[in-house]
């Protein structure tokens, strides 16, 4: 049975039972005022009232229990850390199961579904809720929950065993275990699964659990018939507010040990400063924090937000990049002016999407991280978050999957900065029918437009190659607010970078070693694809290794911390 979009509108009469009962009660009250009419006869002719007193008593007796069950299970749903849309979908499923039990709904629906959730705890809670409902209302034969790792499925016979178990809710996960199998074995398993879904529709509720659609692409693309047996249930997680999280975490800590007043105060401060910025799902955040406090008997330290002055101190400590530093200061001045002027000045909304042009090792990624800090400090983004990706994170291998993959990346980056390195790769194959890359770019453009107030995108790459990318789709250029050029470092600047690395590690570089490093930089600077700061880091790392070998028999502190000319290595650069 094809179930695309069957969660949309099929249960529009959400609380229909209560509505019917109220209408029936009104009819009964009206009837009591009539004279000379047999009330029982009229009641028996009301279409939505049960046809006999005996049947009515049979169904009314457990009604209080049913109402209590619905109240309790709806509370469990409301307590889940998921968004209201996801809660309502789950409630509609439970309500339909009740209506089927009370014969208000006539059609049996299997409710087989793919559940996409960002954490296992939420997924397992949903399975327990579904299991409680199908057991209580007799929607399926009574049973338990079985969570099946695809790594444990060896062949098609294992599927048959699963569907003769005492479970009535069966959930499959870890699909890499299935994708790793021989293609023939995999298809036999999927074929057997499809057979069992059809044969046991009114005995089992089957779920696929994955963190996102990418995990199931290989399954559904290799056996598309199976996809039609499942409805999609996207669970959108919700992060609780600070007080909500504090109360829950404190309660759990108190159950396990005594919590001092000092821990309680520091806990609230920690949650207030870290929860709004967390990139993990809340259950993982909660469990990790509880584990750290329980083990260390103290609240962990957290990185304090930097002021705009501190952020620019970090920027100014970088060697070179004078044009970039000037552009960022001007951008901050403009943002501040717009904020201070409010409606006095007609300054249009600032387009913060950027293109970073420059050769490798010129500081593009480092500056992108600082841009993220600046925009977060100025409250232009909600999180101090930079998601770094390349074209392989956006482009899929199969038709129709690239837009999904790219949309998932955009979703993860919302609230922060999406940094797409080597973006020119998306222009490869231009004019050769490479529709996958074009699909990724079109999805990015749509994401930039739809999330103008919740996402900043930075495209980065080599200057020459990036021109092809910018010409790929006119929509890109029109959405770019700033183009920033990162110039190659001079020999002196690269020496400064090298010396900073050595000084930070505690070394002193001799004059002879300095001259050798500068000579190596001069000899390599004009070569193709010269790595700038990356090149210098390679020299630094190889020189440290060579120095360690050269000083293995020495004990003098001065000898151990001094980098000499013979330590400078360019081996295998």
Image: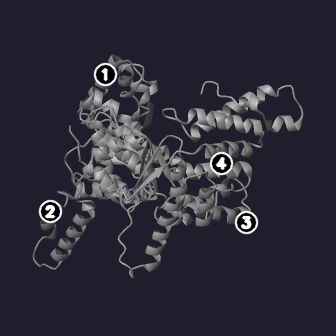
Q: Earlier in the sequence, mark 4 or mark 2?
A: 2
- Pinpoint residue 224: horizontal percent, then vertical percent: 25, 31
Quick one: which residue is furthest to the left in this view? 36
Q: Which mark is residue 145?
A: none
Question: In the rendered view, does 565 fall on the left or right side of 406?
Answer: right
Residue placed under numbered mark 4 in the picture:
291
Residue placed under numbered mark 3 in the picture:
261
Q: Earlier in the sequence, mark 4 or mark 1?
A: 1
**Residues packed near mark 4 inside 10 Å, few (<14), some (14 to 19) or many (20 plus):** few
Residue placed under numbered mark 1 in the picture:
187
Residues at marks 3 and 4, CA–CA distance in whole angstroms: 19 Å
Quadrant in which residue 27 is drawn: bottom left
- Pinpoint residue 434: horizontal percent, then vertical percent: 26, 34
Residues at marks 3 and 2, CA–CA distance in whole angstroms: 66 Å
Q: Earlier in the sequence, mark 1 or mark 3?
A: 1
Residues at marks 2 and 1, CA–CA distance in whole angstroms: 56 Å
Q: Are marks 4 and 1 in contact (CB under 8 Å)?
A: no
């Amino acid at each position: 049975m094809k179930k695309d979009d069957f969660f949309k509108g099929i249960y529009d009469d959400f609380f229909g039972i209560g509505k019917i009962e109220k209408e029936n009660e009104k009819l009964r009250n009206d009837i009591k005022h009539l004279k000379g009419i047999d009330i029982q006869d009229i009641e028996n002719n009301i279409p939505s009232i049960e046809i006999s007193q005996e049947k009515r008593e049979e169904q009314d007796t457990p009604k209080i229990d049913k109402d209590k069950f619905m109240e309790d299970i709806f509370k469990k749903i409301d307590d889940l850390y998921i968004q209201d849309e996801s809660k309502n979908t789950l409630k509609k499923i439970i309500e339909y199961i009740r209506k089927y039990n009370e014969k208000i709904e006539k059609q049996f629906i299997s409710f087989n579904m793919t559940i996409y959730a960002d954490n296992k705890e939420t997924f397992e809670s949903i399975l327990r809720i579904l299991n409680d409902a199908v057991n209580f209302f007799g929607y399926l034969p009574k049973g338990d929950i079985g969570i099946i790792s695809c790594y444990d499925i060896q062949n098609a016979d294992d599927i048959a065993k699963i569907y003769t178990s005492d479970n009535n809710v069966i959930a499959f996960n870890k699909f890499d275990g299935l994708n790793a199998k021989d293609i023939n074995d995999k298809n036999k398993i999927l074929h057997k699964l499809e057979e069992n879904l059809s044969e046991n529709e009114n005995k089992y509720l089957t779920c696929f659990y994955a963190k996102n659609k990418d995990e199931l692409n290989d399954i559904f693309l290799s056996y598309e018939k199976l996809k039609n047996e499942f409805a999609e249930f996207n669970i959108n997680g919700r992060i609780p507010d600070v007080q909500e999280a504090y109360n829950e975490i404190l309660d759990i800590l108190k159950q396990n040990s005594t919590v001092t007043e000092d821990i309680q105060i520091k806990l609230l401060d920690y949650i207030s400063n870290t929860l709004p910025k967390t990139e993990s799902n809340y259950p993982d955040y909660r469990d990790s924090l509880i584990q750290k406090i329980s083990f260390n008997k103290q609240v962990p330290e957290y990185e304090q937000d930097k002021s705009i002055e501190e952020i620019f101190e970090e920027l100014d400590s970088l060697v070179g990049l004078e044009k970039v530093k000037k552009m960022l200061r001007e951008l901050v001045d403009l943002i501040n002016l717009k904020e201070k002027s409010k409606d006095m000045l007609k300054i249009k909304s600032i387009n913060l999407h950027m293109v970073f042009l420059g050769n490798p090792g010129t500081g593009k990624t480092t500056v992108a991280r600082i841009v993220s800090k600046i925009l977060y400090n100025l409250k232009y983004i909600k999180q101090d978050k930079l998601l770094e990706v390349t074209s392989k994170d956006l482009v899929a291998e199969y038709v129709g999957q690239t837009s999904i993959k790219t949309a998932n990346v955009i979703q993860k980056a919302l609230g922060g900065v999406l940094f797409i390195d080597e973006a020119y790769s998306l222009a490869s194959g231009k004019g050769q029918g490479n529709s996958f890359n074009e699909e990724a770019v079109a999805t990015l453009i749509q994401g930039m437009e739809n999330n103008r107030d919740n996402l900043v995108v930075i495209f980065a790459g080599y200057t020459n190659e990036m021109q092809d990318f910018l010409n790929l789709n006119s929509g890109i250029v029109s959405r770019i607010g700033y183009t920033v050029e990162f110039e190659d470092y001079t020999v002196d600047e690269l020496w400064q970078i090298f010396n900073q690395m050595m000084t930070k590690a505690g070394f002193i570089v001799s004059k002879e070693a300095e001259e050798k490093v500068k000579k190596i930089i001069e000899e390599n600077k004009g070569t193709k694809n010269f790595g700038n700061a990356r090149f210098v880091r390679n020299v630094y790392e190889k020189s440290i290794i060579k120095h360690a070998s050269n000083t293995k028999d020495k004990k003098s502190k001065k000898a151990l911390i001094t980098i000499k000319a013979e330590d400078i290595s360019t081996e295998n650069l």
